[in-house]
Structure formats: structure tokens, C-alpha cells
Amino acid sequence: MPHEHHGHSHAHLDPTSGDRRVAVAIWANGILTVAQIAGGLFAGSLALIADALHNFSDMAALVIAFAARKIARRPADKRMTFGYGRIETVAALVNYTTLIAIGLYLIYEGGSRLINPPEVQGWTVVIIAGLALGVDALTALMTYSMQKGSQNIRALFLHNLSDALASVAVIIGGTLIILYDLRWVDPAITICIALYVLYLAFAEIGTPIRTLMLGSPPEIDGGDVVARLRSSSGVVDVHHVHLWQMEENSPALDAHIVVNSVEWDRLEALKSRLKAGLADEFGIRHSTLEFEQCGVCDKAAPLFGHDSRPTNSEVHGN
């Protein structure tokens, strides 16, 4: 049976663009984390330490993202035949998981301090949180233009954005402590920061999980793809359809195409027509199509996925 593996090409920006910005952000967040922890301990502010821990997760996220971008550029080889692009999806999953762990920890600590609020140095909190806001905002701006086409950098950008908002909350809390000695505000704001962090993480973590689970691209309806193939002249049916993302923004298709006897002698033309339609309508430029003659194919074959029925050798225990 003819079997064609179609190459693909995509227009990308320079893959090394943004590396310097990420490196600068790593150093800035590292220095800021040390300053926030020291200031939080001196001022007795859990909110400031919470912001520092969140900022430390930003630095870790930056390091992971930076390393992932480097690894993702490696070409495919005999060990990794699909290439290394999915490392960025793994990095995004690690970063979101880190956000969830930090968020749960901060809720626990904030709840404990809310019962018995400690003494807090309001001015120290405000000054250090103000410096943190400047660094957080700068880092978010540096990653904003890079996050639109990358799960990895989007996770990083959300880390930075949430930390900037957290710094605003800490400044407000410190101001209320200075003006009204509302010490309970500090742990209350910590809990609010944690809830926001959890919201961001849970809202976004599904995307990298879907990619790693070989789920179909969220923007492409598998039923529409099947309908498009079946409606093509010469195609009798379609089965064994696999639709997934090799890496972000790279949808791929694997399918068995049943054709009538008339089209069997001109498969190359049919194949080219099908591939052009997939690329134009769905952006699927990487497709593997296996053709079968009508009457020869297995009518019980599933539409999506592979055939899970046991083979003869499995039935007889060979």
C-alpha cells in the first residue's frame, strides 16, 4: 500500500531572539528574591515572603524556560526522531505545577497567621514591594512579546504578571498597616495572592497536559477533518485517524484512506489534493496518509485511534 510521509516547513522568528532578555530577567529576579526574603524576615511580613517565594518560582521558571528553549533547537536524531521541541511543553507543565504547589503552601501559612497576626514593619514592606513591582513589571514586559507563540514562555509570562499583581497587593497591605495597624491584612493578602496564583495555574495547565497526552489541537475539530477527507472525490471512507501536536503550533495527522478502484491508479494526484486541503483549511502540514482499496480494508476498523482488538498471535498466546 502506498505510504507517504509529507515534510513540512513553518515560518518562525529567529529562535534565538529573546534569549538575552530571559537571561537578564533571571539575574534580576534572583537578586530581588534575596532582597525580598531578607526584608520579609526583618519586617515580619508573610506577604512579602510569599511574594519572594513567588518571585523565586519566577526565577526557577526563567531558568527552566531558558534551558528548554536551548534544548528545543536541537535537530531530530535517531534517539529523538520527532526532535526536542516538546521539551518546552514539559517546561510549561513543570512551571504550572510549581505555581500550584506554592499557592497551596501560601494558603496554609496565611491561614495560620490570620488567626494570630504578628507585628509587621509597614514601611519596609512598602519599600521592598515597590522595588519588586518594578522588576516584576519589567520582566513581564520583556516576556510579553515572546509568549504569544509558546506555551513555555506563556507560562513564564503568567508567572511574571501574577508576581507584579502580587507586589501591588503587598504595597496596599503595607500601606494599610502603616495607616491603621491592620496586621491581619498581611496574611489576608497572602491568601488572596495564593488564590490568584492557583487560578492562573489551573486555567493554563490543561494545555501542556493535552499536548503531552497526544490530544488533538484544541483549535482543530477532528470531526471536521474527517468530514473534509470523506468529502473529497475518490475517497470512500477514512479510519485509524490520529490527530495530534508534535509540538506547539505543529499539528500532525495520521490516517488510513479508503479509495475506489478508479482512483487507485492515480493515487499521487489524490494524495497531493488531500494534503493541500489539510494544509489550507486546518494548517496541518505534516500528514501521513496510508491508502487502501475499497473492499480490501477492514470494515470494523475504528474511526479514531488504532485497532485494540487482539491479533491472532495474541489470541493463541504466541
Image (cartoon, grey):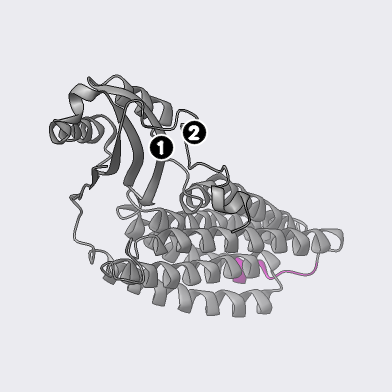
Q: Position of residue 6 (x, y in %)?
A: 21, 47
- Spatial CA distance of label 2 from label 1 is 8 Å
On the picture, is 68 further left or further right than 276? right
Amino acid on which disc 1 is placed: Val
Identify the residue position indicated by label 2 in the image: 302
Answer yes or no: is residue 123 visible.
no
Q: Position of residue 300 (x, y in %)?
A: 50, 30
Question: From which residue to which does the magenta span run?
Answer: 118-125
Q: Which mark is residue 241?
A: 1
Work out which residue is located at the far right of the displayed protein and give it. Answer: 115
> Mark 2 against mark 1, which lies toward the viewer?
2
User: Which quadrant of the rendered structure holds the N terminus?
Assistant: top left
- Name the secondary structure under disc 1: strand
Q: What residue is rendered at 13% in x and 32% in y?
A: 269
Closer-to-camera residue (284/150) = 284
**Considering only order in the chain, which callout, 1 or 2, is on the residue closer to the N terminus?**
1
Residue 256 is covered by the magenta coloring: no
